[in-house]
Image (tube, rainbow, N blue to C red):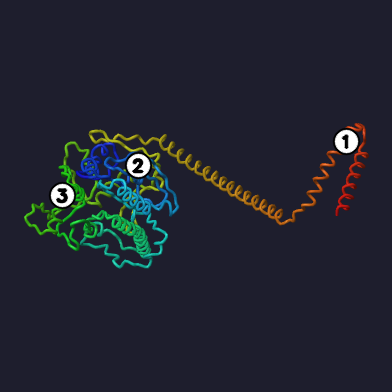
Amino acid sequence: FHQLQTNGENCSSPQWQQTYERKTFATYLRDFGGYRTAYFGKYLNEYNGSYIPPGWSDWSALVRNSRYYNYTLNVNGDKIRHGFDYHLDYYPDLILNDSLQFIRYSKRFFNSKPYLMVLSFPSPHGPEDSAPQYQNLFLNEKRHSWNYAPNGDKQWLLRNTAKMSQLHQNFTDFLNAKRLQTLQSVDEAVNQIYEELKNLDELVKGKAMPFEFDIRVPFFIRGPNVPAGKILPQIVLNIDIAPTLLDIAGIKIPEHMDGISFLPYIRLLRNGNHHLKLIKRDTFLVERGKFHNNKNNIDRLLIPIVGKKQWLQLHCLKSEYQSPCRPNQRFECFINVNGVQRIRKCSSFNRKHFIRSQKNTQGQCICPPLLASNLERNSDSIRTLKRDYRLKKKRLKQHKHEIRSNFENRVRRSDKLVLERLSMIEDDFDVQGVYELKKLIEISKSSSSLSIESNNHSNHDNRSSLLNNNLANITTSQLSNS
């Protein structure tokens, strides 16, 4: 995205979607270059999955920030929920599978059409959930560059940072090991994508400070007519990627794009043609900051700049920073163990019930009065939340107990039924007894009908004697037959 001051207050806002998001290299490649475009992975922290950005033919993007399990994807307009199963839900592997499928599909059904594919892995971003096969790697690796701070000849962050304790060092070692573990899945994905393109013959935690290892990131280029093993001495920035992609596709670079194409430099390395007209860059600007309150100053008058110590002293005099924390208070001032004044967030602050102050066009604050009724209402809200939490916890415990009881009863019933069936299977089946029982039932039915027709007033003794005689006849006939 070009000609932006920051993405912090712009990502996914209606104005941002209607202006800057429509001017990416994806829109130009698809609309003017005839490319099939695909995006797989994390998009933006504030992306809520309610729409598909323009310029993408195939879209599968993560809703909100980086996750490895238990996340939601927008897949071509449909929100799909994923859980905790590694084989089905591990996000880096899912990105790899989607990308391989897109390559094969493009080769089979759109063989004459070029395509662009962008992969955005969550690795090594937190929560650093690595694949199971990599969870024991790098656990014994140690970093040796500890405690360069405090350093008096560096910028204010290193001047005011205390030495790291052994606990912090161990945690940082473990955290870096977990980050390296997550990157193993990315390495495997890059290798598989490379092999897939080769088989199809298609081969053509912090960024806040301007230190050398933060801004000097290696950039590799591979493709047809790109000389191998060459190093480009010119400065290349991330804003140059979009113009270069458009230049490779033969599309005119729009004027609103900030960067330049470095394709002429690649041609220079290949051909050695020193007569090419090149745009030279010997410096670039690296900065980071926030919008100052001066943006609300209509006259754009300069505001005196004060140091951090003076800024803390001025703010800690205000009522909204006084300690201890009151209901609906966001921050409080305190003195740390080194006797230095600091500001921290109140642990009792509830964002749901926080009433943010507003400003009018003259920069004057329009704030709700802090009345006793407000305090009482906030206290009632806190008590209500605590009561609801206790009830919810109690109901959840009862629900778990019911589930456990039902499961145990079901297991007992099933075990008992299995044992009964096994005992029936193990018993010998009496075929002769069943045959005799069938005969007795037939004789008893026939004798009952005869006795009713002959004499309706016959008694029980007569029917019994008749039944006994029939039984005796059956027994005699069986003995004679045997």
Residue 76 numbered mark, or none: 2
Frontmost of labels 2 and 3 is 2
In this rendering, the answer to whether 269 lies above or below 467 is below
Q: Which residue is mark 1?
A: 450
Q: Of all residues shown, which one is farthest toward the left? A: 275
Q: CA distance from mark 2 to mark 1?
A: 82 Å
Residue at (23, 38) in percent of width and height: 19
Binning the other alpha carbons within 10 Å of mark 2 as few (below 14), some (14 to 19) or many (20 upward) gives some
Dots 2, 3 in contact, CB < 8 A = no
Quadrant the N terminus occupies: top left
Mark 2 and mark 3 lie on one chain; the one further toward the N terminus is 2
Q: Is residue 453 visible?
A: yes
> Looking at the image, do the residues carrying marks 3 and 1 touch, with CB atoms under 8 Å apart?
no
Q: Amino acid at mark 1?
A: Leu
Q: Is residue 41 visible?
A: no
Q: Nearer the viewer, residue 35 or 337?
A: 35
Looking at the rendered structure, the kind of residue marked 2 is Asn
Question: Splitting the image into 4 quarters, where does residue 294 fall?
Answer: top left
- Residue at (23, 33) in percent of width and height: 361
Q: Nearer the viewer, residue 325 or 219?
A: 219
From the viewer's perspective, is residue 371 above or below residue 408?
A: above
- Whole-percent x, y for residue 253 in the image: 16, 44
Q: Is residue 208 above or below residue 148?
A: above
Q: Amino acid at mark 3?
A: Ile
**Where is mark 3, residue-wise?**
260
Tell me the mark number nearer the camera, choosing from 3 and 1: 1
Q: Could you say where residue 110 lies in the image, as x and y percent from the top left?
A: 29, 46
Given this view, does label 2 or label 1 mark the residue nearer the observer?
Answer: 1
x, y percent for residue 198: 28, 57
Query: Local crowd at mark 1 within 10 Å, few (<14), some, or many (≥20)?
Result: few
